[in-house]
Amino acid sequence: MIASVPRPPVDWFAISPSLILLGVAGACLLFAVLVPDAARRATAAATAAGGFVGAFVAAILLYDKTPVGTSVIADTVRRDRYFAMAAIILAGVGLVAVLVSYSEREKAHVAEYYALLAASAGGMMFLTQANTLMTLFLGLEWFSISLYILCAIDYGKERSLEAGLKYLVIGGFGSAVLLFGSALVYGATGKLTFDGIAQAVAAADLQHDALLLTGLAMIIVGLAYKASAAPFHMWTPDVYEGAPTSVTAFMSAATKVAALLLTFRILVTAFPQEEKLWTVAVAVIAVCSLAVGNYAALVQKNLKRLLAYSSISNAGFMLIAVSANSALGGRALVYYLIPYAAASIGAFAVIAARERELGREVTIDNLAGMGWERPLLGAAMWTFMLSFAGLPPTGGFLGKFYVFSAAYDHGWLWLVILGVAATAVSLYYYLNVIRALYLRPGTELQFAAGGQPPRDLLLQAGAIACVVVVVGSFFAVQPLIDLATKAVASL
Amino acid sequence: MTSHGWLTTTMIMLPLIAAVVIWVIPMPRVWVAPAALLVSLFEVGFWIEALVRYDFDRGGLQEWNHATWLKDLGVSYSVGFYQGYSVWLVGLTTVVMAATIAYGFWMGRDRPRAYYGLMLFLTGAIVGVFTAQDLLLFYVFWEAMLIPLYVLIGAWGGPGRLNATIKFVIYTMVGSLLMLAAVIVYGLQAGTFSMIAGGTNPSDWIFLGFAAAFIVKAPLFPFHGWLPDAYRESPAEVSAVLSGVISKAAAFGFLRICFVLFPVGVQDFRTPILVLAAIGLVYGSLLAFRAPDIRGVVAYSSLAQLGLIMLGLFATNDLGIDGAVLQMVNHGLISAVLFLLAGAVERRTTTGRFEALGGMAKGRPALATVLMATGVMALAVPGSTAFAGEFAILAGVFQQGWFYAVVGAVAIVLAAMYVLRMISGVLHARKGPAVHDGALDLRPAELAILVPLVVILLFLSAWPAAITERVTTAQPSSIPAGTTAATAAGESK
């Protein structure tokens, strides 16, 4: 009897950003068969872009209309400003991803590509509003599976296929660990909702329960896989290198946003009693990421690999903010993600343009002279590198400043010192990119450019938008910090 | 509160905005250099206005402009002229930057939009360093100086530029990042990053964080590894900026931040820093005497002169500090002129090595006169402004120990040796193989750039008290805790 199953009231508005993107994904799949070849790419891309704009607007409305965070739909998802902020960032990233990928995608699977892009962004949004271990896993798999396929979408190319497979195997392993951990936590507390877990732990005094702690450790590990934090980062360089560059652009920016924001949410809301343990654990993972990311990046020649290691090191910085376990840390995390996401997708956009121009892989060496030949893309790349390195006038600088402040506020001066040391090391390879762009003459290139000239207005618009965000977040930092403060307060 | 301080903000923002305009708005190549020069001359004009407005008798913070930047951490955009010395150093900056931009114009640097944009950006950042009243803002401007320099040296420099830039950046960034950690610790302990309201902090570690950045940037022996390469491989006018202005930003950092906020650290580390400064003074002078080319002489003499300036500062008495500030201005102008002259000589002979030079005085009276006049002031003949500065420094540091004064006096003798060697190596001696008879004398345009700088030096020689009597109103080391906060309260009413 259908009627006898109690159905919870559904707050459609709370999940509207994900729903919009799901709808767009469905529409794009239909376009794959219904729209003729000639118009398919434009239709699918425009629809996807429209979907991201819609999700962006919906997220802004959600932020505006949700002064107090609540759990909705039978407490399975959260409707709060923290989620709305995540959805805003993710929708922005998705929109730029559409701009960047438009010229790269030719005929093959173009509509499916945009369908998967929209679906994975929707999954990430859903993940950041998860309020139970079930919805967490659902969101995680939702976006992961979309990304596995996206990585392998150029299956004619061996590298792309390899990237997809590697991501699938290792990502699947990470998901399994997370699922196992969730089961253990459920076994220990009998609860699935985050606040329910916290209450059950407090009520039954379970802080030292072995089952619960093992589960917590496995959840952290599973999320660290997704955030590509060391020592769970092994897949990152290969997948970033092998996947189509526009996919890497989206993935590098968006998965970090989703995974790290969710990490902070679940640790703070579900495991406040185990704070002493997980702050140290996260700090250790952060230090590992800083060490591995920076050390390995020093010797990279391939730019996509270099940025992959740079993303590992940046995950380390953001995990410092998580480990501070404070409102300041949360603010630092949310703020850091904004310029980071923009710089990340922007940098890969520039690489994509260069790749198309040269018709081969982009290495440090064959960036030579690009800053002078392509002033706009060169200056944009320069800005992104400065932001990664944490130099003014970019948001990356203030992000690092907030992260270090949060760590110091937590009483961890040693973490500040390590972070500063890591920044010093990272300068070497970021400046190496700028050096290649501006200080080496283009005549050093030993081959003829084999690709199409990068006359790609959409990609350039995307890069400019990223520059505006990266530099703008430096000057307009106070409004963004206000947004982040309210977001964290609504957890 | 006498004024809203828009003058200070204008002086920072005008070159920064002009730089962005030059980068973004397409304009004919021939317009770029004149536009940049015009902006830099406006900067000089604004500085003269600031000089007129600044009340040296009252001292303290004037032309203060303030706006909240990061509310939750107590960071603000806060700029103004604090004490007379910041007025003089901003003046040095605007004058030297105008001269160097004019020199770049004369040299006809290629890729003009990038080049002049970077030079203007650098101008704004340096003025920002000298006027920032908030530690994070200071740090932002401090770092903002680095990036244009990196590209200016790397893209327009000599053949060894790539290694020079790497050394330069790694050295200075390690120092700067220690400063960032110190800024964060200081700011979060004080609850504000304001240099005015923050008050003093007794921690030696925070002092050392700041000192690391300043010592590397100055540089002080033994942290000068980046200096010879950077000064040799840069374009001449960028060397002039590095040695003339950027090194002064480091000395300024000690004066403005360490002396005011960390009096305990200054007391604790006075002796080590004085010893390093004295060693650097002698060591730099000896290396300058051995250097094979003009730029080497000026570069190592820079190391020596910075040692002398640090001796004056860390004498921590009025006499030493007054002398040090005068000497900062002197050395800034002298080394700017010498580097530009080095560039002019290199342009005519394709080399700066003494073995290939010589005998250039004959038939080139203007070059000989300018080089001779500047060189004589560089070696501090009695009556010159450098003599006044060095005398005050030595008299000041004598109160810390006769030993330092003796070292300083010895170094002045060494200065005479290396300067005279340079002058004779270029102008006199036998005519070198690289000197063609056709090599021209200084052209009118070059004279128009160099002569004003020399005239300022001559003016200061006649009246060094113009600066020494207008450095500070209170002895920095004797400012008791809380006075600075009270000054700020008075200003903000």
Image (cartoon, grey):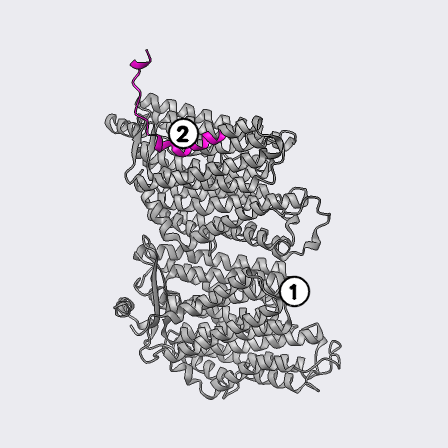
Kind of residue at badge 2: Ile
Residue sitting at x 70%, y 47%: A449
Q: Position of residue A370 (x, y in %)?
A: 63, 53
In the image, B110 versus B297, the foreground residue is B110
Q: Is residue A338 magenta?
A: no
Question: Is the C terminus of chain A in the top left, top right, bottom left or bottom right quadrant?
Answer: top left
Q: Residue furthest left?
A: A203
> Which residue is tagged 1?
B158
Viewer-side residue, B52 vs B382: B52
| Residue B457 location (% of width, % of height) | 51, 83
**Magenta part of the chain:** A1-25
Q: Quadrant of residue B466?
A: bottom left
Query: Relative to residue B302, is residue A209 depicted above or below?
Result: above
Residue A6 visible in rendering: yes
> Which amino acid does the dot numbered 1 rest on?
Gly
Residue A298 visible at all: no
Q: Which residue is mark 2?
A: A219
Give B417 or B431, whichever is nearer the viewer: B431
Magenta residues, dominant SS class: helix
Residue at 63% x, 68% y is B109
Q: Residues within 10 Å of mark 1 (few under 14, many from 20)?
A: some
Q: Is residue A18 magenta?
A: yes
Q: Secondary structure at mark 2?
A: helix
The answer to which image quadrant residue A296 occupies is top right
User: Where does the N terminus of chain A fall, quadrant-wise?
Assistant: top left
Q: In the visual, does A362 lie left or right of B15? A: right
Disc 1 element: loop
Q: Is residue B201 left or right of residue B178?
A: left
Disc 1, disc 2: CB below 8 Å?
no
Q: Position of residue A102 (x, y in %)?
A: 57, 39
- Image mark 1: chain: B
Left or right for B43, reference A351: left
